[in-house]
Image: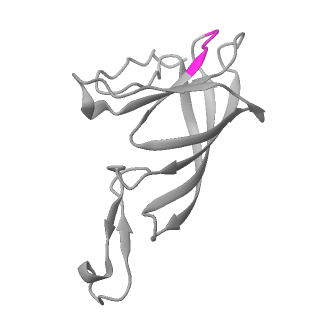
Amino acid sequence: MSRPRERDPSSHSNPDECVVTHCAWDAVVDFTESKFFCTVRYNLVIVKADARALRLDTSALDVRSVAVDGNAASFTLTVPESAKPHLGSCLEIDLGGGAAEGDEKVVEIQYNTSPEASAAQWLPPSQTAGKKHPYVFSACFV
């Protein structure tokens, strides 16, 4: 068994309880609204028996729905702390109880970004080389 994972003080995540082992991301890009319409699927491994939640770092997202192992799941999305606004919001997803160490789960999240989301940089045609088409890029995972 690998050594326990420590919590990162600059993150809301909880890798000491569950670890993401795979991610699949699908998105539709809307240049008119400066938004991504997304579905992400995470494969998890439980590393602490009876882990109850997956915590993810987010910023300016509109979470539409969450499912765990194909079943609708409850979730909360916190308001950023005024003392630590750089941490963004915590998306906490209820995994249900009773998970054993080594159990695997699949979490699917449907969400939209907002134009204020810091992970995406939207450029109008006037700021691109050909001046005809808009452009978006990200140095983060949106």
Near-viewer residue (118 or 10): 118
Percent x, y for residue 108? 66, 40
Residue sticking out furthest to the left: 83
**In the image: residue 134, left or right of residue 54:** left
- Counting the numbered discs, the total is 0
Percent x, y for residue 65? 65, 39
Near-viewer residue (108 or 15): 108
**In the image: residue 139, left or right of residue 24:** left
Vertically, is 125 above or below 122? below
Percent x, y for residue 13? 43, 25
Examine the rendering and report whether any part of residue 69 can be seen.
no
Q: Does the magenta stretch include residue 51?
A: yes
At 37% from the left edge and 68% from the top edge, which residue is drawn?
136
User: For the stretch drawn in magenta, what is the main secondary structure?
Assistant: loop
The span picked out in magenta is: 49-53
At 40% from the left edge and 43% from the top edge, which residue is drawn?
60
**In the image: residue 120, left or right of residue 48:** left
At 61% from the left edge and 14% from the top edge, which residue is drawn?
52
Percent x, y for residue 95? 66, 21
